[in-house]
């Protein structure tokens, strides 16, 4: 394993993040505060508790998941798309670096950035609501797995995209709606039976449910299914990336 190459890619990507640290740090804090003002004050005044948890605290896992999923995708997709855009990816591909080392460098940096955002949002939420984390190790595990899996997914999008418009297409039109409809701000048990069944086809439900279980011990679906879902998603992304580098699809044309 060429750790020097991995470190070079990782440090380069993290340096780009720290150059815009104010934007990276302030933006999620403001967004999270607005969510608490809008959802916590407006809706929370009408919904006191959900399954014994105050509504303000109940939405915290969903807010964190929303941010780390979208940040993981956008950071990884832009990270690999930009070398394609300016043509420097050919220098990377001709260097003595294999595809696994490239993926570890880019995906590791993107996952680190989204994990940082998740911790910032968690700390911000602590100013608005009283949080209790019943399973802290599970919470950390879910955060790390989600950051990694969606960074892998973003890496695929970055290779697939032919322009900046396509780069934003999947996160805006598919991922964000799935997160909003995946129980981020409500329990799916509050829905009519028909829509509960429909919602179970949304894969994001399993991630948010497992992450919420780590906080409050509450879950819409069994925790085993949540772990299976995120492990399966990670495995599929890794297989797709392996196939991309094996065939050269969208990177050697």
Image: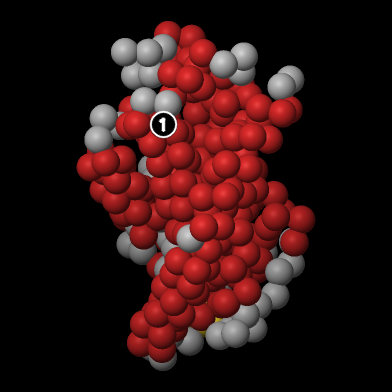
Where residue 140 sits: x, y (%)? 70, 55
Name the foreground residue: 178 vs 202: 178
Q: Quadrant of the C terminus?
A: top left
- 57 left or right of 186? right
Q: Quadrant of residue 122?
A: bottom right
Where residue 22 sits: x, y (%)? 50, 69
Where residue 80 sits: x, y (%)? 44, 33
Q: Quadrant of the N terminus?
A: top right
Q: Please indicate, yes or no, whether residue 247 appears anywhere in the rendered image.
A: yes
Q: Please indicate, yes or no, whether residue 108 appears anywhere in the rendered image.
A: no
- 198 left or right of 130? left
The residue depicted at 53 percent of the width and 63 percent of the height is: 21
The residue depicted at 64 percent of the width and 34 percent of the height is: 8
Name the foreground residue: 59 vs 186: 59
Query: Residue tagged by mark 1?
Result: 83
- 213 left or right of 87? right
The residue depicted at 57 percent of the width and 26 percent of the height is: 102
Q: Secondary structure at mark 1?
A: helix
**Residue neighbourhood size for the residue with mark 1, other residues' Cα within 10 Å, grouped as few (<14), some (14–19), many (≥20):** some
Q: Quadrant of residue 130?
A: bottom right
Rendered position, 121 above or below 169: below
The residue depicted at 38 percent of the width and 36 percent of the height is: 82
Name the foreground residue: 102 vs 198: 102
Rendered position, 109 above or below 246: below
Colouring scheme applied when the structure was drawn: secondary structure
Rendered position, 210 above or below 120: above
Where residue 24 sits: x, y (%)? 49, 63
Rendered position, 68 above or below 98: below
Name the foreground residue: 20 vs 78: 20
């Amino acid at each position: 394993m060429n750790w020097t190459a991995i470190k070079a890619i990782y440090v380069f990507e993290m340096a780009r993040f720290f150059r815009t640290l104010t934007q990276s740090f302030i933006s999620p804090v403001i967004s999270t505060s607005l969510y608490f003002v809008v959802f916590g004050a407006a809706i929370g005044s009408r919904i006191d508790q959900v399954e014994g948890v105050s509504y303000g605290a109940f939405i915290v896992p969903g807010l964190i998941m929303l941010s780390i999923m979208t940040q993981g995708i956008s950071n990884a997709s832009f990270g690999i798309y930009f070398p394609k855009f300016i043509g420097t990816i050919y220098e990377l591909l001709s260097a003595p670096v294999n595809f696994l080392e490239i993926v570890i460098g880019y995906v590791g940096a993107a996952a680190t950035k989204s994990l940082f955002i998740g911790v910032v949002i968690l700390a911000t939420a602590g100013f608005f609501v009283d949080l209790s984390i019943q399973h802290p190790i599970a919470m950390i595990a879910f955060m790390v797995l989600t950051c990694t899996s969606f960074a892998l997914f973003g890496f695929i999008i970055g290779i697939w995209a032919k322009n900046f418009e396509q780069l934003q297409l999947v996160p805006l039109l598919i991922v964000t709606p799935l997160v909003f409809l995946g129980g981020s701000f409500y329990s799916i048990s509050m829905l009519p039976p028909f829509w509960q069944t429909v919602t179970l086809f949304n894969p994001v439900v399993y991630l948010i449910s497992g992450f919420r279980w780590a906080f409050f011990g509450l879950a819409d679906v069994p925790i085993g299914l949540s772990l299976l879902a995120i492990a399966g998603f990670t495995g599929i992304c890794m297989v797709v990336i392996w196939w991309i580098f094996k065939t050269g699809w969208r990177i050697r044309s």
